[in-house]
Image (cartoon, rainbow, N blue to C red):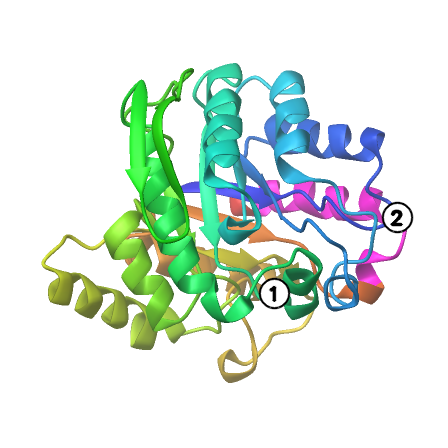
């Protein structure tokens, strides 16, 4: 099971120097991958959770690819309806090529109503648009010259080169906790990427739902690659009142053991707590927490 870290690409402390330091900590501490979040328009519903400035993830990952050598790089999650799939496919393929095949494409439908409005998009259509855009992405990565004709996007004889280095394409992780996300992961993804879930939820609800979706579709269940919090505490936390990855270090280690037993191939650890915490200039403290965790998680 591979373990990664979210790099906070938002907030006043997220400077170029800080982001470079984050990449170095993740790589030097022995973690396997890093991921960054996505917002395009920092509207009030976005900044209420993730204060600005917010770094655009594909630009940032291109930079981080150049200052790292080993770790995989990804999005948690790229909001698919926000970008034309022709541009998205080309940007991601370029990232995968320039990082020597280290890209992981975490995707989702988005949630910020004000942000959809700022981009002139209908949030009520985000699920169906996401499905079609993902199919277009996969088509563009499948051949050198591609045509695609759908309801939301259509193009003819587009030269899609350079295609991704990793074949047939970088792994696609479908984010989201609901039934629609599980169905989308079965149909279009290599992994299901549930986000910040309570203790016991995956075993009791999430994975049975994923298996049911796979059985209904007549397809194999995708891999499990969850994002869980990294919130160590000095005191023991009761399981009925905590998220996976929250509590004493021994509780967090036990959570990772359970995820390994459930078949998780990757686990992403997320240090983000809330907007107030993110607005503080405490990235040095957060990186120290990650370095410390690398020791007691080993």
Q: Position of residue 218 (x, y in %)?
A: 9, 58
What is the chief secondary structure element of the magenta stretch?
helix
* Quarter occupied by the N terminus: top left
Residue 86 vertical placement versus 78 (above, below): above
| Contact? badges 2 and 1 (CB < 8 Å) | no
Most distant residue in the bottom direction: 240
Left or right: where 254 falls relative to 19: left
Of callouts 2 and 1, which one flags the residue occurring earlier in the amino acid sequence? 2
Q: Position of residue 113 (x, y in %)?
A: 64, 69
Residue 267 vertical placement versus 252 (above, below): above
Dot 2: element: loop
As measured in the structure, the alpha-carbon distance from the residue carrying label 2 to the one carrying label 1 is: 29 Å
What residue do we see at 62% from left, 24% from top?
A: 62
Residue 115 vertical placement versus 155 (above, below): below
Pick the front one: 97 or 282: 97
Residue 132 shows up from this direction: yes
Q: Position of residue 100 (x, y in %)?
A: 47, 15
Residue tagged 2: 12
Residue tagged 1: 248
Q: Position of residue 56 (x, y in %)?
A: 69, 40
Q: Quadrant of residue 120?
A: bottom right
Pick the front one: 256 or 89: 89
Magenta segment includes 287: yes
What residue do we see at 67% from left, 30% from top?
A: 59
* Start-end of magenta stretch: 277-296
Pick the front one: 8 or 185: 185
């Amino acid at each position: 099971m591979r373990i990664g870290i979210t790099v906070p690409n938002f907030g006043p402390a997220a400077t170029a120097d800080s982001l470079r330091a984050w990449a170095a900590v993740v790589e030097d501490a022995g973690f396997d991958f890093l991921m960054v979040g996505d917002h395009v328009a920092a509207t009030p519903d976005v900044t209420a959770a993730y204060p600005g400035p917010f770094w655009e993830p594909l630009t940032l990952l291109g930079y981080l690819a150049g200052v790292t050598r080993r770790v995989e790089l990804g999005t948690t999650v790229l909001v698919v309806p926000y970008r034309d799939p022709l541009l998205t496919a080309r940007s991601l393929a370029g990232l995968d090529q320039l990082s020597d095949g280290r890209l992981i494409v975490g995707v989702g439908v988005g949630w910020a109503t004000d942000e959809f409005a700022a981009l002139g998009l209908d949030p009520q259509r985000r699920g169906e648009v996401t499905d079609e855009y993902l199919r277009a992405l996969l088509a563009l990565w499948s051949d050198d010259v591609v045509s695609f004709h759908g309801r939301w996007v259509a193009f003819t004889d587009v030269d899609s080169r350079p295609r991704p280095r990793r074949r047939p394409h970088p792994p696609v992780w479908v984010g989201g906790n609901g039934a629609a996300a599980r169905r989308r992961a079965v149909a279009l993804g290599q992994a299901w990427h549930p986000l910040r879930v309570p203790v016991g939820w995956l075993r009791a609800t999430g994975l049975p739902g994923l298996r049911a979706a796979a059985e209904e579709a007549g397809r194999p269940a995708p891999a499990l690659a969850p994002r869980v919090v990294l919130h160590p505490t000095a005191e023991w936390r009761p399981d009925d009142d905590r998220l996976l990855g929250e509590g004493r270090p021994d509780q967090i280690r036990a959570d990772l053991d359970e995820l390994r037993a459930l078949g998780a191939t990757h686990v992403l650890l997320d240090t983000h707590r809330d907007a107030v915490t993110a607005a503080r200039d405490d990235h040095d403290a957060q990186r120290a927490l990650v370095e410390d965790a690398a020791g007691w998680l080993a």
